[in-house]
Amino acid sequence: MAKKNAHDESLSDTILTGRERYINPYTDFGFKKLFGTEMNKDLLISFLNALLDIGKNRITDVQYLNSENLGAGQDDRRSVYDVYCKTKDGSRFIVEMQKSEQSYFKDHSIYYATTPIRDQAKKGRWDYHLENVYVVGVLNFVFPDNEYPADSYRHVVKLKDVEDNHVFYDKLTFVYLEMPKFKKIEDELETMFDKWMFVLHNLARLMERPKALQERVFKKLFHQAEIAQYDEAERRRYASSLKEYWDYTSIMDTAFMKGKREGREEGREEGREEGQQKEKAATVLRLKQMGLTVEQIAQGAGLTADEVKAILTPNP
């Protein structure tokens, strides 16, 4: 039997001492446990129906697809999704929990949408008919620059004609949830969408199921989310995932705060554009000092690996 890591064991013990009763859905383990398993697909179905409010076309079943797509060739970039599934009518869904802001998050979403589109291609003669594709982003951050009003946290994006604003293509939909903006308390929950937002936003802080969440699906969710009923292997996996989440958010918060401050100080004298470049460079250097790899820095700072390397090894 492999020897346990003492740090992992102490963290696992801490999780079971009463500080948390339910898993944190912002962790990789937590989100996939609740939404990415065959046993819990009814939770995913309920969440998607509440999110999309599609009436008669409600989702009744999903088939999980391979969440890791290696691309068409050996040089293609790999895509790994939290949840990738399709419904009975052939619609494809990618559901992602995004822990922190990325500079190129919109590009990231568009890139992910290409896989379920490409997957529908058929060999031989084909008329290019496509089924619906949905990319759902549960965001643990707010879009920068006040892109949306402070009280607006659900955004449905489609391809539209800029002249008359009609939907040009209805089969590609992006749905974003800015979770930090959700402020409703239990007494204000009216719709199933409200209730799902409340659960995702507050689950890790709750010690019991709120009275407003009496639907059968939430009874199951709280049972599946209860840490005490996990076996030792699941508790250790969750402990590792939670530590990774804590470390990641702490490092990113610290780095971005210091990077922005340093960038702003230099930017006052050097102009807006150059100041933004200084801000990115300061963030990269701060993350490097904290021991992150080039790939981790690139992901966190929203840059390419080459851009990170250029900052870390400037020309003489």
Image (cartoon, helix red, strand yellow):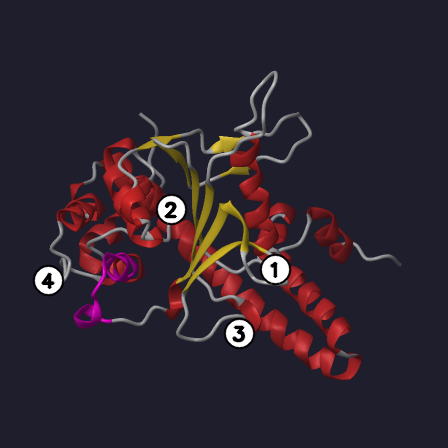
Tell me the CA gap for discs 3 and 1: 15 Å
Q: Is residue 9 magenta?
A: no
Tell me the CA gap for discs 2 and 1: 24 Å
Q: Which residue is mark 3?
A: 146
**Start and end of the magenta stretch?**
185-198
User: Which one is in front in this view, the residue at disc 3 or the one at disc 1?
Assistant: 3
Choose the circle earlier in sequence order: 2 or 1: 1
Numbered circle sitting on residue 103: 1
Q: Mark 4: few, some, or many residues within 10 Å (few <14, many ≥20)?
A: few
Check whether the beta carbons of the residues at disc 3 and disc 1 lie within 8 A of each other.
no
Q: Position of residue 31 (x, y in %)?
A: 34, 46
In the rendered image, the residue lying farthest to the right is: 316
Q: Which residue is mark 2?
A: 241
Q: Is residue 250 visible?
A: yes
Of residues 200 and 12, the one nearer the viewer is 200
Of residues 136 and 285, the one nearer the viewer is 136
Q: Position of residue 36 (x, y in %)?
A: 34, 38
User: Which one is in front in this view, the residue at disc 2 or the one at disc 1?
Assistant: 1
Q: Which residue is mark 4?
A: 211
Q: Is residue 34 visible?
A: no
